[in-house]
Image: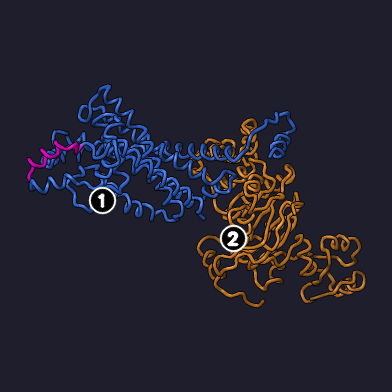
Amino acid sequence: MGALEKEIVAIEGGKAVKPVERKSSAMRWAMRGIYIIWLREFKRFWRDRARRIGGFAQPIMYLALLGVGMQSAFKVFGGGDVPYIKFMFPGILGLTVLFTSVFSAISIIWDREFGFLKEVLVSPVPRSSVALGKIIGGSTTALIQGAIFLILAFTPWVYGFSLDTLWKVLAVMPLIILLSLSLTSLGVAVAARMTSMEGFPIIMNFLLMPMFFLSGAFFPLQGLPRWMDVLTKIDPLTYGVDALRGIMLKGLDLAAGMPGNIAQFAAWFKDPEILRIGLEKGYPNPSALSSMARQATLPVQAHPLWLDVLVMAGFGAFLFALALWQFNRAE
Amino acid sequence: MGEHAVEVEGLVRKFGDLVAVDGVTFEVRRGEVFGFLGPNGAGKTTTINMLCTLLTPTAGRATVDGFDVVRQKREVRQRIGLVFQDPSLDDRLTANENLDFHAVVYAVPQAVREKRKRELLEMVDLLDRADDLVITFSGGMKRRLEIARGLLHHPRVLFLDEPTIGLDPQTRKYIWDYVADLKKREDITIFLTTHYMEEAEHCDRIAIIDHGRIIALDTSENLKNMVGGDIIRIKTDDDARAEELLREKYRVNILEDKDCLCFEVERGEEFIPRLFQDFDVSIQSINLHRPTLDDVFLKLTGREIRDEEADGFMADMRRMVTRVRPPFAR
């Protein structure tokens, strides 16, 4: 390697360019790849005005239309004193992050279609660093979208303009990063070996829609039939939305609900306590339901924050590994 | 191994049952322009893809600048520049940004980056468009930018896969001028593929490839000598006397003597001056036909290389027909 460097210097018109000793270890190559791919991803996002505006307009639409429209229904069905818009705001934040993250990976298919991927794949940077750059780049765009959306949290209709809101918004950022990293990984894992630009959104929507609906972004996850309850617990997004909501409504309290023993943890899995109560009291009796809801810690947060974060990190690590593996296998 | 810029030994690549490259062996000498000539689907691109580490060979081995293309991928990648058949630029970035991207992934030292970028953009006449998005470029400009990009990290070997396909004649000439210039200026080996006969003439040596096999490898001069000498046709005031003279004095074999005299000589360009020096009969016209690589390919395979210069749809159709049709008259 040193020889090549000297050669490069020599070729430069014989001028005395100092032969700087540069480490060109695998690590350096990887860092180079990650950096430049991230930068490109970011530039492309920033230049695409449609993406910036669309990414902002869509969540506002959800918030304005669904948030207002569902308010009365939410009260009847056990939302209690929590205004629906406050309840759903973190859900829409999750939705924004979900879609921005996952669909950022379509750029891989795009690059393959338009040839740029070749330029990247024949370069000396390791493949994993390319995947990593894509993942970090995708999460960056998701984080930006999320941050823009979070400005709305300060409006009087949502959480109001206060120091408390600011603190919560800041506390939510690391969670968004964690969530977007795992979801971009999911996108990369699927896109890595796909060649069809049309197929990707179809497959993704097939995967994302249930993920989204089961996550509790729009409605509290209680009183669900057993099978659905199980599905919501498998859904990684549930924990993301749950954590976001917990912070936005209750503030950051990582230690809350930390069990002294495993028993409590197991009990949570067996649960659906709520379902039992619901059946005994005989629903649909709105008053019974809403009083029940007030008794329980729901609907604000189903799981303790530490559990949410732990599960998210676990899913993230798995999807991340899957993405790297798939990308390395591609072509 | 490693003495030559590229060394290939018994390289095979299969795609399922299809044998795209069927045991090719050759070497590319340092500093030469080496051409791979053959019809579409002959295995040219597959070979290039193996040499530049994009495809793993099914069998055989190859080195580029002394490094094994399977075991020493990164070393190979650092030493090669590539211009693909299809564009591989990011058209949402500017020309400059595309070069920056390349400079980073190939670890071009920061100190020389700007200077080199300027030089190369100047060479390909794109300096004034450096900060425009590539999406606004024409096909020829894109190809030129790709060539500039391929040279940015001072590769030892530059691979050009059909560098002029789909370009107008003017731009094609342009690009060949760059290649010639490049060979003079830089210490670089150029490996290119083409299915344009006349373009293969730009190469120092040519390998003719068909159905995944190299069927001939030599300088274009020697290849053409395989099919015979140059054909000269002359018209004179007195053909009978001229014929006699040619036979006796120049010892050529008259092939035809109806409208004009037609004969074959070893080196036409040397023969004609000799003829003019002391030919008694006055010559009305003279015509020299030198064998082309087309003739070589025809002789070797019994087929002509389909020239896909003709535009668009018909060319595509013809190509498809050529692919389906079994090779005849072999």
Verify whether residue A286 appears in magenta. Answer: yes
Residue B269 locus on image (x, y percent) = 82, 60
Q: Quadrant of residue B281?
A: bottom right
**Shown colour of chain B:** orange
Rendered position, A36 above or below B171: above
- Locate residue A73 relative to residue B317 in the image: left or right: left
Q: Of residues A282 and B250, which is closer to you in this image?
A: A282
Spatial distance from mark 2 to mark 1, Cα to Cα? Answer: 63 Å
Verify whether residue B24 appears in magenta. Answer: no
**Shown colour of chain A:** blue
Q: Of residues A3 and A234, which is closer to you in this image?
A: A234
Residue B95 appears anywhere in the view: no
Magenta span: predominant SS is helix
Q: Quadrant of residue A84?
A: top left
Q: Which residue is disc 2 drawn over?
A: B309
Q: Residue at x 38, y 56 (%)?
A: A199
Tell me the subunit letter for badge 1.
A
Q: Where does the magenta region start and end?
A: A285-299
Q: Which residue is disc 1 drawn over?
A: A230
Q: Specify the quadrant that holds the N terminus of chain B.
A: bottom right
Residue A29 locus on image (x, y percent) = 58, 40
The amino acid type, in three-letter code, at marker 2 is Glu
